[in-house]
Amino acid sequence: MPKPIQTVFPTQKHLKGLNKLLKFFKTQTAIAESLGISRQTVNDWYCGRKVITEQYAYRLERMLQDRITIFELRPDLSKKDLRMPKF
């Protein structure tokens, strides 16, 4: 019997930031293309199968000129958890 998919964020809190992100880009495909990743990865964020990495959250914050923050995309993080992203 297959194991059920366990979501990373079972609450709606993470979706608030992701939905805000979707308002800027309009589609998950556009988000994926802007980051150079697969659409499936972005879909996994929305379904809670994967967590958006700090690096991608940071890049999106910079792309959107702080109209969305890392903490909106990753509500589980605090300022003390952040590390300088490597590009």
Image (cartoon, grey):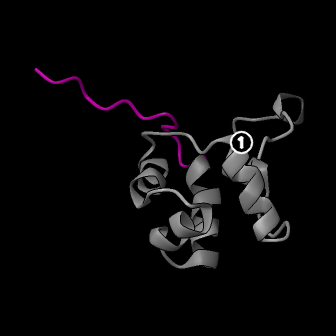
Q: Is residue 1 left or right of residue 31?
A: left
**From the viewer's perspective, is residue 56 above or below residue 35?**
above
Question: Residue, x 42% and y 48% (percent of image)?
Answer: 44
x, y percent for residue 56? 67, 51
Under tag 1, what secondary structure?
Answer: helix
Q: Is residue 9 magenta?
A: yes
The residue at 55%/40% (across/down) is: 51
Identified by mark 1, the residue type is: Glu
At horizontal 57% and vertical 65% (from top left) the residue drawn is 19
Up-down relation of residue 42 to residue 76 (above or below): below
Name the residue that disc number 1 marks: 54
Viewer-nearest residue: 73 or 11: 73
Q: How many marks?
A: 1
Decide whether residue 20 is among the magenta residues: no
Q: Main secondary structure of the magenta part?
A: loop
Name of the residue lying farthest toward the left: 1
The percent position of residue 30, horizontal first and vertical second, equals 52, 73
Q: Is residue 14 above or below residue 1?
A: below
Q: Which image quadrant is residue 80 in? A: top right
On the rendered structure, is 42 left or right of 21?
Answer: left
Looking at the rendering, which quadrant does residue 77 occupy?
top right
Extreme residue toward the front, this view: 87
Q: Position of residue 7 (x, y in %)?
A: 42, 35
Q: Which residues are magenta?
A: 1-13
- Is 7 or 34 nearer to us in this picture? 34
User: Residue 49's spot in the image, x, y percent?
Assistant: 42, 39
Image quadrant where one finds the N terminus: top left
